[in-house]
Amino acid sequence: MTITATEARPRTLRVALIGGGLMARSHSFAYNSLPSLFPELGVVPELSILADVDDERARAAAAQLGFARFTSDWREAVTADDIDVVDIVTPNSLHFDIAMAAIAAGKHVYCEKPLAITVDEARRMRDAARVAGVRTIVGFSYLGGPGIQLAKQFVDDGTLGDIWQIKSHFFADGNADPSLPRTWHYERAKAGLGSLGDLGSHVISLVEFLGGPVDEVFGELATVVPERPRAVGALSYGSKAEEGAPLDPVENDDIATVVARLSGGARALIETSRVANGHSFDLALEIVGSKGSLRFSQQDSYAVDLFLRGEQAQRFTGTTAITMGPQHGDYAAYWPFGGVTLGLHEQKAIEVRNLFRAIVEGHEAYPSFEQGASVVEVLDAAQRSSDERVWVDVAR
């Protein structure tokens, strides 16, 4: 067999990962699985540098995740000559400085959501990437799932008719225990918003992907666990506080409800909770249109439930469950037969593929900093609405 030069030498894109916590594992999994899932892309990620808050953490994370070297100075990683892509999985307050430095150094940027804490920062990140011509992507993981891609197809081709209403929620109970420590997720300066920023970013990205831009919102944000135990060195999920530790205030929201008007005329209901007892990881949506409706749940991502008014077959069966299979989106990269649930790790690989394909082919990725900034604009409007108890226009 003759091996061509292209087959023998796939393109390498060298990655610097900034942060070594929970999402660093998911991103590393995606990089390692990319060549086997999407070999047609002809790209192999090289895990070059991992940066974390100190040498000990950086060394341990680099060894665990397979990075060639480590540093405790993210600036060193961002400006290194042998880096093509900077991947940001830090607390939200660091996104802006790291991304802006990466863009200035001519690197492509992969940033977890929310893109930034403030609208001003998000817009500056978006504008800097435009001017520099680098490729960007934001970690709205669920947009690439086969079920969401099928929902988008049914919206765009008119199957559902005019879109009247979108309802979506993201409920999780990972923070429901009041004895869990006050990590950076509860600090306004480091995280920005709480439940709405963390979980709601995903929901807003889905609503705008399927229904178009959000124009106006009425929001209600609430904190139901007002204090949490102090824990020195607690970084993220899974940390524990010592018994009897002093209590510190929670500075952002535990639950949020947002009613939205979309530019296309539809209405949306967005609900989030990080203290939703009984909901381990519950992301779901429903689209109601003039011709039918569609339901999707990430926990049951092997299927999309579709109802079309007036179709003879559905007079008796009601809603039809469409089983996801190789004919839907990127499902075929994972399984040659239908009915298997695809989770967060699998969808992260689709996200990485989207960024790398944009780099190789020279076009914008989706969702880029453009979409990331739009979501931050909606978050900001929802917070102002809750504070002022009025409808608020989303400033664009």
Image (cartoon, grey):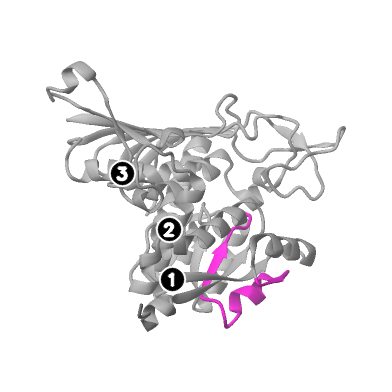
Q: Nearer the viewer, mark 3 or mark 1?
A: 1
Q: Residues within 10 Å of mark 1 (few under 14, many from 20)?
A: some
Tell me which residue sits at (59%, 41%) in the image. Answer: 194
Whether residue 373 is situated above or below residue 185 in the rendered picture:
below
Q: Which residues are magenta?
A: 68-92
The image quadrant where one finds the C terminus is bottom left
Q: CA distance from mark 3 to mark 2?
A: 26 Å
Q: Which residue is mark 3?
A: 210
Whether residue 303 is situated above or below residue 186 in the rendered picture:
above
First along the sequence among labels 3 and 1: 1
Tell me which residue sits at (62%, 61%) in the image. Answer: 94
Q: Which mark is residue 43?
A: 1
- Expressed as whole percent of the image width and height from the top left, the position of residue 83 reads 55, 77
Q: CA distance from mark 3 to mark 1?
A: 30 Å
User: In the picture provided, is 312 more to the left or to the right than 355?
Assistant: left
Q: Amino acid at mark 3?
A: Leu
Q: Is residue 206 visible?
A: yes
User: In the picture provided, is 199 more to the left or to the right than 378?
Assistant: right
SS for dot 2: helix
Q: Amino acid at mark 2?
A: Leu
Q: Which residue is mark 2?
A: 37
First along the sequence among labels 3 and 2: 2
Q: Is residue 258 visible?
A: no
Single out the residue that lies furthest toward the right: 244
**Residue nearest the viewer, comparing 215 with 184:** 184
First along the sequence among labels 2 and 1: 2
Q: CA distance from mark 2 to mark 1?
A: 11 Å
Q: Residues within 10 Å of mark 2 (few under 14, many from 20)?
A: some
Tell me which residue sits at (15%, 23%) in the image. Answer: 313
Whether residue 52 is situated above or below residue 117 in the rendered picture:
below
